[in-house]
Image (tube, grey):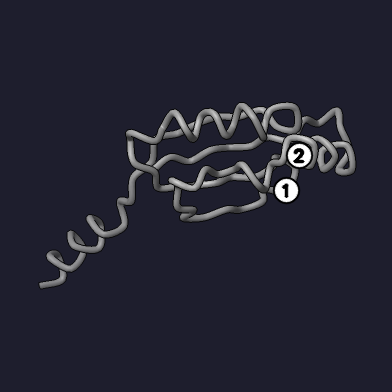
Amino acid sequence: MITIMLKHHQDKNIEQLREIRNKNEFLENFPPKSARVVSWYVMMGIGQVVTVKIPASELRALNMSVEQSVWGAFSTEFYPTYDLHPVMKEKKAALEE
């Protein structure tokens, strides 16, 4: 999994950002078809945070979709991510036994 922070460019208003995304065909190109969206949240005052599951072999496709559709409207940050919840749930259950 990878979490992508899409930070709005603060020097642009919502209409300008929407225009850039439309011109870049953001919704058509991001995320790539090889990615499965786990979550997609808006962070008020920041932008959007998207977590996707994608095979490691498709990481280049993710990078290309960002470069082609996101740049101009957002700055980006990428964070490799994993789901710790099942591990913690198992440990907690073991403690309760």
Question: Residue at point 58% right, 45% down?
Answer: 49
Residue in front for this viewpoint, 18 or 27: 27
In this rendering, position of residue 21 left or right of residue 57: right
Q: Earlier in the sequence, mark 1 or mark 2?
A: 2
- Residue 54 percent across, percent down from the top left: 39, 43
Vertical placement of residue 29 versus 75, above or below:
below
Residue in front for this viewpoint, 73 or 22: 22
The residue to which callout 1 is attached is 44
Vertical placement of residue 16 versus 53, above or below:
above
Q: Which mark is residue 21?
A: 2
In this rendering, position of residue 58 left or right of residue 49: left
Badge 1: how crowded within 10 Å, few (<14), some, or many (20+)?
Answer: few
Question: Residue at point 25% right, 57% down?
Answer: 88
- Residue 34 percent across, percent down from the top left: 43, 46
- Residue 16 percent across, percent down from the top left: 88, 37
- Secondary structure category for the residue under label 2: helix
Taking the view exactly as shown, the residue that stands out farthest to the left is: 97
Vertical placement of residue 65 versus 45, above or below:
above
- Quadrant containing the N terminus in the rendered view: top left
Give the residue type that dot 1 points to. Met
- Secondary structure category for the residue under label 1: loop
Q: Quadrant of residue 85?
A: bottom left
Q: Quadrant of residue 67?
A: top right
Badge 2: how crowded within 10 Å, few (<14), some, or many (20+)?
Answer: some
- Quadrant containing the C terminus in the rendered view: bottom left
Give the residue type that dot 2 points to. Arg
Vertical placement of residue 65 versus 54, above or below:
above
What distance separates the C-alpha of mark 1 from that of mark 2?
Answer: 18 Å
Taking the view exactly as shown, the residue that stands out farthest to the bottom is: 97
